[in-house]
Image (spheres, rainbow, N blue to C red):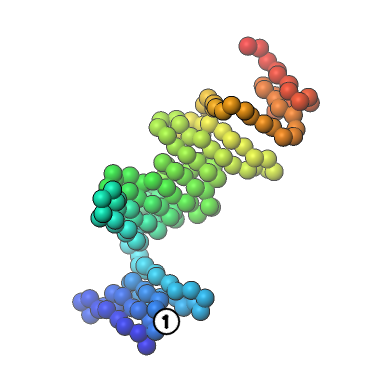
Amino acid sequence: DGLTFDYGGTEAMRIDGSGNVGIGGSPSTNANHHTLQVIGTDTYQRLSLDNTGTGGRKYSIHSVNNADSDLAGKLAIYDDDTPAWRMVIDSTGNVGIGTTAPIGQFTVHNGTDGNTVITADAGEGRIMSLNDADNAYKPLKFYGSRHEFLSGNVGIGTSSPSRLLEVSGEG
């Protein structure tokens, strides 16, 4: 049951009896929700969203295969109007904004050597500012009228402070 659309003798799209849509193949069925699937082996399987109203933009969501070495295995959002990759999620779940190669669980890239990374490693949370090569720290600034550290010790120049505030080194 359903409706099929053929192009050149090959099925291009199918709408099954439950309302699920498959583009490039038959859709998966799941009794709990409707599905729109874009199926194929092209480098970029793409879903495009184009708002042609005033102030609207055209974005596309891509699932990328190994033919693109920079984006292989990633889900990516592309700004077709600029054009630029805006966000990626890699196969390990790392998210990158402004970069196609996140260097931590959450990376925001803003220009050359401007990477702010939020990650959890070995049971500790980290906020870092790193260069593009991920081998040197960059300045990290905190702005605000108040900063609170609710528990634990704070160390400057030491990774294991023994007091509420411990400063080590010269300067």
Residue plotted at (70% across, 25% down)? 155
Residue plotted at (31% across, 75% down)? 13
Circle 1: is it few (<14), some (14-19), or many (20+) Cα within 10 Å? some
Residue plotted at (47% across, 39% down)? 108
Residue plotted at (68% across, 40% down)? 124
Amino acid type of the residue that numbered disc 1 sits on in the rendered structure: Ser
Q: In which quarter of the image is residue 170?
A: top right
Helix, strand or loop at disc 1? loop
Residue sitting nearer the eye, 79 or 38: 79
Image spot of residue 38 (x, y percent) = 36, 67
Q: In this view, does 127 lie to the left or right of 149?
A: left
Image spot of residue 113 (x, y percent) = 45, 30
Q: Is residue 83 left or right of residue 151?
A: left
- The residue most toward the top is 171
| Image vertical order of residue 69 relative to residue 6, above or below | above
Name the quadrant of the N terminus. bottom left
Q: Is residue 137 left or right of residue 151?
A: left
Q: In which quarter of the image is residue 109?
A: top left
Q: Quadrant of residue 163?
A: top right
User: Residue tagged by mark 1?
Assistant: 18
